[in-house]
Image: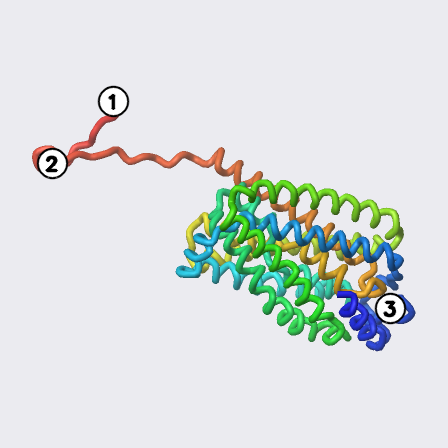
Amino acid sequence: MDATRNQTALQYSGSNDLWDNGNLYNVTPHNPTGNMSLVFDPVTDKIVSGLTIIILCTTMVSLGCTMEVAKIKAYVVKPKGVAIALVAQFGIMPLTAFTLTKIFQVGPMEAVTILICGCCPGGNLSNLVALALEGDMNLSIVMTTFSTIMALGIMPLLLFLYCKGIPNMLYNVPYFGIVIALIMSILPCLIGIAINHWVPRYSPVVKKVGLSLLLIAAVVIGIIAGIIVGDTVWVVISPKMIAMASLMPLIGFLLGYIMSCVFRVKERCRRTIAVETGCQNIQLCSTILKVTFPPEGIGALFLFPVVYIFFQGLESLLLIIIFRCYKRFKPAAEEKPPYLVVEGKVQEVKAP
């Protein structure tokens, strides 16, 4: 991975003055972000990168422990729901991310950050939200599985295609490093699936340990980033970045639901597809940004997924509240009285 990053850094160093002596300079007249200097020293950078990988691996092992081989096989035989969800996720979200970068006219590195976030597969947050919305949990879990596996080929392809529309970034995105990061996410997921299939009694323990490691690593990264990032964090919390972070999941939820309505799937599946479309694997996004890009290139932008997951969780919570209120206050369906045939005549049966 270090070799990949060094090769990437050399690749960046000669690309149209994007990087010069550790600074990222504007390449478009619409980029108001100035420059982002190197955020971490080499030792701290390796520590943060290692913790980011730990977060990804523990998350994916825990996610794999929720998946069942029998349910995956069932959706392979009848793949309609999964196919619609995959088209929604890898069609709607990357296009939404790319469109927003053009509307808000952000710089090339910010645009790539948003695009990577939009191209990521579904994460475990979607499973929790689908459960709260009384969606199809089998579809949600299988969809997360399939999108994670298919991202190995689809995500680099989408990035290559969309980066054609981002100035000077087509050949400056570390595609090979992204593939390595995707493999790093798939292998732990397969390990989790194997544990849940062969020794299911250990699945609850693995999930609890994984959650503990996830929380510890996330807190440590938060503390380090808060101390060292300093003034460069304004790049991540600029009004444009916040606007895109808030709009992306909302658009994903809405368009995912509309698309599922067009294909006339069941109501439970509609809610599930909407959630799977709007929720991305933020741990994977963070790992790709932190591990595959040189620190002098990505700067504080590797923290963007933190902003994104905040709005993703907030909007998911809002959807859950709206759904619960609808369930509570919707008018009860009128029950038709039963009828009984008596001597060739239909008579209404009165309730006792």
**Colour scheme of this structure image?**
rainbow
Secondary structure beneath disc 2? strand
Q: Position of residue 295 (x, y in %)?
A: 83, 62
Label 2 sits on what residue type? Lys
For marks 3 and 1, the one nearer the N-term is 3
Q: Which mark is residue 25?
A: 3
Q: Give the number of the mark in front: 2 or 1.
A: 1
What's the CA distance linking mark 2 and mark 1? Answer: 21 Å
Q: Position of residue 310 (x, y in %)?
A: 70, 47
* Residue designated by label 2: 345
Q: Is residue 261 left or right of residue 124?
A: left
Q: Residue furthest front?
A: 199
Label 3 sits on what residue type? Tyr
Secondary structure beneath disc 3? loop
For marks 2 and 1, the one nearer the N-term is 2
Q: Residue at x 32, y 34 (%)?
A: 335
* Figure quadrant of residue 132: top right
Q: Position of residue 326 (x, y in %)?
A: 50, 38
Judge the density around disc 2: few (<14), some (14-19), many (≥20) Cα neighbours within 10 Å.
few
Q: Which mark is residue 312?
A: none
Secondary structure beneath disc 1? loop
Q: Residue at x 57, y 38 (%)?
A: 321
Label 1 sits on what residue type? Pro
* Residue designated by label 1: 352
Residue 270 shows in the view: no
